[in-house]
Image (cartoon, helix red, strand yellow):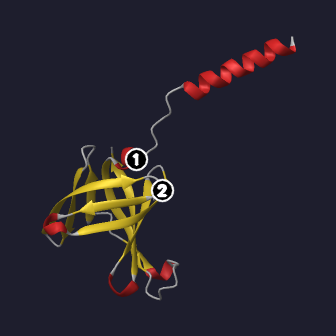
Amino acid sequence: MKRIWLAVFAVSTLMVACEKDRDDSMRDYLQGEWRLVRMGVDANQNGIFESSEMVNTPDSGLATTVFRGDGSGFSAIHVGGYSVDAAFTWTANDHEQTLTQVYPDSLTVKSGFTVEDVHHFHLIAPMAQGVTMMMVYSRTRN
């Protein structure tokens, strides 16, 4: 009887292990439309983003970013009746937990990527003179 239960356990384990994994890659996670909800600069350069260094952005959709499944995307910033849009291409590296965006004129931004939860993620981007910026995005739709 013990061998039968062991065989059942082994077969069920193999069946679960052989099921197609749900694709939790960064690339799949990012696809969709995101709104910038908080941002900040590590002004004292201590590697920690204190609440005093972070600000919430207006709910009016000040800045949105769309990541498409084909590796293209665009960012849009709306301020006081003016809009600026920028197309980019993007790649995600699951192993390094990085997101690379390439904008026109070969401007390349490589950011650290952290998932906060199903609907929020953080980008940590280096800026000039050792200063680091954090941007927190919230999913608006897939």
Can you give x and y, in whole percent of width and height, for residue 129 in the image?
35, 87
Q: How many marks?
A: 2
Which residue sits at x=26%, y=53%? 66
The answer to whether any part of residue 61 appears in the image is no
Q: Is residue 43 above or below residue 65?
A: below
**Alpha-carbon span between mark 2 and mark 1:** 9 Å
Look at label 1 and name its amino acid: Tyr
Q: Nearer the viewer, residue 75 or 127?
A: 127
Left or right: where 128 falls relative to 52: left
Which residue sits at x=21%, y=66%? 77
Which residue sits at x=34%, y=79%? 127
Can you give x and y, in whole percent of width and height, for residue 117 in the image?
50, 53
Callout 1 secondary element = helix
Can you give x and y, in whole percent of width and height, for residue 38 in the image?
39, 69
Which residue sits at x=18%, y=67%? 106
Q: Quadrant of the N terminus?
A: top right
Left or right: where 109 falls relative to 95: left
Can you give x and y, in whole percent of width and height, for residue 140 in the image?
33, 51
Q: Is residue 105 above or below residue 31?
A: below
Answer few, some or many: residues within 10 Å of disc 2's Cα (few below 14, many 20 plus, some between 14 and 19). Answer: some
The answer to whether any part of residue 29 appears in the image is yes
Label at residue 115: 2
Q: Nearer the viewer, residue 61 or 133?
A: 133
Residue pointed to by mark 1: 29
Examine the image and state in which quarter residue 54 appears: bottom left
Left or right: where 56 falls relative to 102: right
Q: Counting residues from the N terminus, which is met first, the one under dot 2 or under dot 1?
A: 1
Look at label 2 and name its amino acid: Val
* Tags 2 and 1 touching, CB below 8 Å: yes
Callout 2 secondary element = strand
Label at residue 40: none
Answer few, some or many: residues within 10 Å of disc 1's Cα (few below 14, many 20 plus, some between 14 and 19). Answer: some
